[in-house]
């Protein structure tokens, strides 16, 4: 399924942009897991994949010095990331996340994000 199509799964698709307080789960847990996995920081953000039964999206979290996290769902096509790239990253995932439906980005996606000079 292409990114941006209607969410028909039981897990709700997160909003396009949102500002979370660090005390609001599971975003603090997502950030901790990305940091513990030594996931590369691209620019000032960490990236991951979130997937439901019929949808997949690339997301980023930008930690700040204060009590707020910034979260965004990316338009992956703008950075040359295809649905196939996302599907392959999920299939090859090392299952680092303890939260269901969350996956690390692949090296291929990381390279495309870096090449796209994502914020």
Image (cartoon, rainbow, N blue to C red):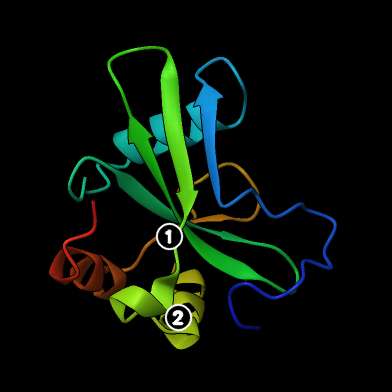
At label 2, counting other C-alpha atoms closer than 10 Å, the crowd grade (few under 14, some 14-19, many 20 or more) is some
- Residue of label 2: 88
Task: Say left or right for 86 vs 26.
Answer: left
Instruction: Decide: is 65 above or below 49.
Output: above
Frontmost residue, 80 versus 11: 80
| SS assignment at label 1 | loop
Frontmost residue, 12 versus 15: 15
Instruction: Decide: is 8 above or below 32.
Output: below
Q: Position of residue 54 (x, y in %)?
A: 74, 74
At label 1, counting other C-alpha atoms closer than 10 Å, the crowd grade (few under 14, some 14-19, many 20 or more) is few
Frontmost residue, 21 versus 34: 21
Q: Position of residue 103 (x, y in %)?
A: 49, 57
Which residue is located at x 41 percent, y 81 percent? 85
Tell me whether the residue at label 1 lies in contact with that at label 2, contact meaning CB atoms closer than 8 angstroms.
Answer: no
Calculate the distance from the C-alpha at mark 1 to the C-alpha at mark 2: 12 Å
Q: How many marks?
A: 2
| SS assignment at label 2 | helix
- Residue of label 1: 94
Mark before the other along the chain sequence, 1 or 2: 2
Q: Nearer the viewer, mark 1 or mark 2?
A: 2
Q: Position of residue 20 (x, y in %)?
A: 54, 26
Which residue is located at x 33 percent, y 68 percent? 106
Frontmost residue, 117 versus 22: 117
Task: Say left or right for 98 vs 118.
Answer: right
Q: Quadrant of residue 108?
A: bottom left
Instruction: Decide: is 54 above or below 42.
Output: below
Quarter of the image where the N terminus is located: bottom right
Which residue is located at x 30 percent, y 71 percent? 109
Q: Position of residue 77 (x, y in %)?
A: 40, 79
Instruction: Decide: is 100 above or below 25.
Output: below
Looking at the rendered structure, which numbered label has been put on residue 62?
A: none
């Amino acid at each position: 399924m292409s990114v941006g199509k209607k969410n028909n799964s039981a897990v709700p698709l997160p909003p396009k942009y949102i500002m979370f307080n660090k005390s609001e789960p599971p975003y603090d847990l997502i950030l901790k897991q990305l940091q513990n996995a030594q996931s590369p920081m691209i620019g000032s953000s960490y990236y991951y994949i979130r997937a439901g039964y019929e949808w997949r999206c690339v997301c980023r979290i930008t930690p700040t010095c204060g009590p707020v996290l910034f979260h965004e769902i990316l338009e992956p096509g703008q950075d040359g990331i295809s649905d196939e790239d996302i599907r392959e990253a999920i299939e090859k995932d090392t299952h680092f996340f303890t939260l269901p439906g969350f996956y690390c980005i692949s090296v291929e996606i990381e390279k495309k994000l870096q090449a796209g000079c994502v914020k």
